[in-house]
């Protein structure tokens, strides 16, 4: 059974940083493309970033370019999202997704809440 558990969310001040992690199990992580998806309050979901199985980062949402960095540790079956220079509009529930990207739904796990507020 595919399991994806995101963690590391919380309350951050504007300009602050958070590092999200996603522990994956139940599938071959190292051969899977992985991504982060977020859903802001009252809005639809939006893809944040995608990293291919070979570690190539293939997509960033325009509004997070230069601030967020996606990475993966295949030895630990873990996906990461380093978020710097956080803005209130980054407030959302963040989900990690197996084999998902813009145009392809993939398998979403449990999310973690990120709130950016002073």
Image: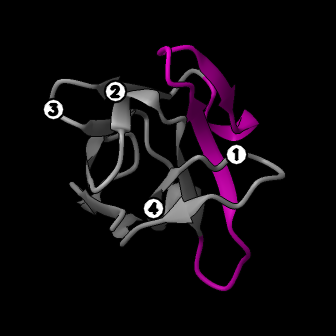
- The N terminus appears in which quarter of the rendering? bottom left
Q: Which residue is mark 4?
A: 94
Q: Earlier in the sequence, mark 4 or mark 2?
A: 2
Q: Residue at x 73, y 75 (%)?
A: 44
Give the magenta range: 40-65
Q: Earlier in the sequence, mark 4 or mark 1?
A: 4
Of tags 4 and 3, which is closer to the observer? 3
Horizontal side of 53 relative to 61 (left or right) equals left
Decide whether residue 60 is among the magenta residues.
yes
Horizontal side of 31 relative to 51 (left or right) equals left
Measured along the vertical axis of the image, is residue 70 above or below residue 57?
below
Horizontal side of 62 relative to 20 (left or right) equals right
| Neighbour tally class for label 3: few under 14, some 14-19, many 20 plus, Cα within 10 Å | few
Q: Are marks 1 and 2 in contact (CB under 8 Å)?
A: no
**What is the residue that sits farthest to the left in this orientation?**
76
Q: Which mark is on residue 76? A: 3
Q: Within the image, what quadrant is residue 66 found in?
A: top right
Q: Position of residue 10 (x, y in %)?
A: 24, 64
| Neighbour tally class for label 2: few under 14, some 14-19, many 20 plus, Cα within 10 Å | many
Measured along the vertical axis of the image, is residue 62 above or below residue 98?
above
Q: Within the image, what quadrant is residue 33 found in?
A: top right
**What is the residue that sits farthest to the right in this orientation?**
103
Disc 3 from disc 1: Cα separation: 22 Å
Q: Which residue is mark 1?
A: 101
Say which element carries label 1.
loop
Say which element carries label 2.
strand
Q: Within the image, what quadrant is residue 15 found in?
A: top left
Q: Residue at x 25, y 38 (%)?
A: 78
Q: Which mark is on residue 72? A: 2
Say which element carries label 4.
strand
């Amino acid at each position: 059974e595919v399991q994806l558990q995101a963690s590391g969310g919380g309350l951050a001040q504007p300009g602050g940083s958070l590092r999200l992690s996603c522990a994956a199990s139940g599938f071959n992580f190292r051969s899977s493309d992985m991504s982060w998806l977020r859903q802001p309050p009252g809005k639809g979901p939006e893809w944040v970033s995608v990293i291919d199985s070979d570690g190539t980062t293939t997509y960033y949402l325009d509004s997070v370019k230069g601030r967020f960095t996606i990475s993966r540790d295949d030895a630990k079956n873990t996906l990461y999202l380093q978020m710097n220079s956080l803005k209130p509009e980054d407030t959302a529930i963040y989900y990690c997704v197996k084999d998902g990207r813009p145009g392809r739904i993939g398998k979403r796990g449990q999310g973690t809440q990120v709130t950016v507020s002073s």
